[in-house]
């Protein structure tokens, strides 16, 4: 298996596990708020879900940037 495929596979597994742990961790979260987007607002989401999902999205995007820099 090439290094690129191994990296993508590891990142997918790692971020999926983080997302699963996020859902387990927010089961009893009672603090909720709406996110104000440019067009409208979202439904009330737990604050821990917003913070955790933004961390996971940053991890995914950062890993793609890192993979792109190493290829050049």
Image (cartoon, rainbow, N blue to C red):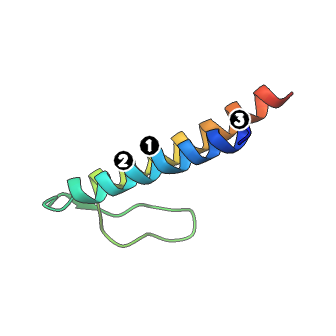
Quadrant (top left, top right, bottom left, bottom right) of the N terminus = top right
Vertical position of residue 36 compared to residue 18: above or below: below
The secondary structure type at the circle numbered 2 is helix
**Do the numbered discs 2 and 1 sit on residues whose CB atoms are within 8 Å?**
yes
Residue sitting at 53 percent across and 42 percent down? 58
Label 3 Cα neighbours within 10 Å, binned few <14 / some 14-19 / many ≥20: few
Residue sitting at 61 percent across and 43 percent down? 61
Reading the image, the residue beneath label 2 is 51
Depth-wise, is mark 1 or mark 3 nearer the camera? 3
Reading the image, the residue beneath label 1 is 55
Among the two numbered marks 2 and 3 on one chain, the one whose residue lies closer to the N terminus: 3
CA gap, disc 2 and disc 1:
6 Å
Question: Which residue is at the front of the view, 10 or 40?
Answer: 10
Which residue extends farthest front?
1
The secondary structure type at the circle numbered 3 is helix
**Labelled disc at residue 3:** 3
Locate residue 49: give its quadrant: bottom left
């Amino acid at each position: 298996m090439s290094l690129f495929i191994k990296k993508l596979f590891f990142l997918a597994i790692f971020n999926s596990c983080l997302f699963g742990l996020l859902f387990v961790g927010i089961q009893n979260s009672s603090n909720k708020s709406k996110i104000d987007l440019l067009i409208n607002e979202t439904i009330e989401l737990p604050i821990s879900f917003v913070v955790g999902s933004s961390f996971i999205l940053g991890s995914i995007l950062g890993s793609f940037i890192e993979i792109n820099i190493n290829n050049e």
